[in-house]
Amino acid sequence: MSPASPTRAGRAWAGLNERQRVYLRVIYDRDRAAEADLRRDRAQRRTPPPA
C-alpha cells in the first residue's frame, strides 16, 4: 500500500456526510474530556464514579 492510498478508516470517514462527522467529533471530544476528568480525579485520590 503506498503512502498516498487512503486507509480503511480514512475511506470510512470520507464516506460520512458533514453532519455525521460533526456528531462523531463531538462524541470524541466529550469522551476525551471525560477520560481527562477521571485521570485528574485519580491523581487527586478521589473515588471514581461507578461504571
Image: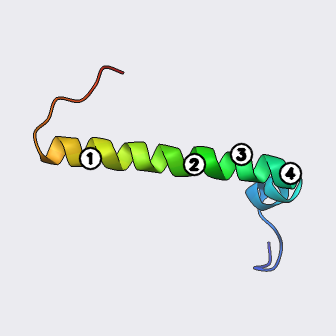
Q: Residues within 10 Å of mark 1 (few under 14, many from 20)?
A: some
- The residue under label 4 is 16
Residue at x-position 26% and y-position 47%: 39
Disc 3 or 2, which lies upstream in sequence? 3
Q: Secondary structure at mark 2?
A: helix
Whether label 3 touches label 2, CB < 8 Å: no
Disc 1 or 3, which lies upstream in sequence? 3
Across and down, in percent, residue 32 comes to 46, 50
> Which label number is shown at residue 39?
1
Q: Which one is closest to the eye, mark 3 or mark 2?
A: 3
Whether label 2 touches label 4, CB < 8 Å: no
Please count the marks in the image.
4
Amino acid type at image mark 1? Arg
Across and down, in percent, residue 2 comes to 80, 78
Whether label 2 touches label 1, CB < 8 Å: no
User: How far is the residue under mark 3 from the one under mark 2?
Assistant: 9 Å
- The residue under label 2 is 28
